[in-house]
Image (cartoon, grey):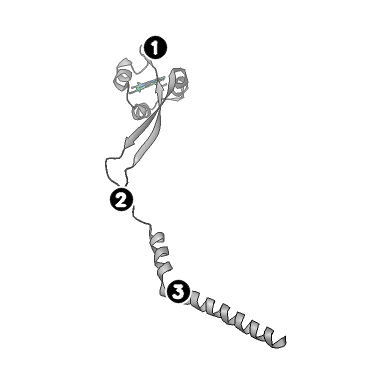
Amino acid sequence: MHVIYFRFELQVYNVTRYLSDHPGGDEVLLAAAGKDASEEFEDVGHGSAARLMLDEFYIGEVDVFIKANTEVVITPTLAAIDKKKKSLDPINKFLYFIVLAFFIITLGVGFHFFNLSS
Ligand code: HEM
């Protein structure tokens, strides 16, 4: 069981001195104050002029941490399960045994002939 946090950054704009000049009116800005207004800003379809003005009002950013309200159970992936299965596989053990036996026999035969010739 894991607790998941989402972390993201929000840009903060101080639009106080733009309230009276905003073509969309001051009400929408005041209603969005202190909140994440990204969606509303995009929904209106602000053009490049509005985007260029953002720099003028930018004052910084805040880090936002949100705790997911569901408990997340992380299950192993199929590949991980498969790998685990393979390591316990008796056929694999048998193959290792064959390779080891072959190695020992080769060494034995080698020593045998070496001893005979000396
Ligand atoms: C720093 C933030 C903002 C800036 C600099 C800005 C700037 C502008 C500008 C320049 C326009 C004229 C149209 C254009 O050039 O796209 C505009 C229109 C508008 N904006 Fe904003 N805006 C900001 C935030 C917002 C927010 C947060 C909202 C909504 C919650 C909003 C709602 C509107 C609306 C409704 C219009 C009128 C669209 C129309 O009548 O066609 N604006 N804004």
Q: Mark 2 or 3, which is nearer the eye?
A: 3
Q: Mark 1 or 2, which is nearer the eye?
A: 2
* Amino acid residing under circle 3: Lys
Which image quadrant is residue 116 in? Answer: bottom right
- Residue at label 3? 93
Image quarter where the C terminus lies is bottom right
Mark 2 lies on a secondary structure that is: loop
Q: Is residue 100 left or right of residue 74?
A: right
Rendering coords of residue 25 (x, y %): 33, 16
- Residue at label 1? 17
Asked whether the beta carbons under mark 2 and mark 3 sit within 8 Å of each other, the answer is no
Q: Residue at x 45, y 24 (%)?
A: 51
- Residue at label 2? 73
Residue 6 seen anywhere in this rendered image of the structure: yes
Q: Earlier in the sequence, mark 3 or mark 1?
A: 1
Q: Earlier in the sequence, mark 2 or mark 3?
A: 2
Rendering coords of residue 85 (x, y %): 39, 67
Q: Residues within 10 Å of mark 1 (few under 14, many from 20)?
A: few
Q: Nearer the viewer, residue 107 or 118?
A: 118
* Amino acid residing under circle 2: Val
How far, Cα to Cα, is label 3 from label 1?
A: 76 Å
Rendering coords of residue 101 (x, y %): 53, 79
* Amino acid residing under circle 1: Arg
Q: Residue at x 40, y 23 (%)?
A: 12
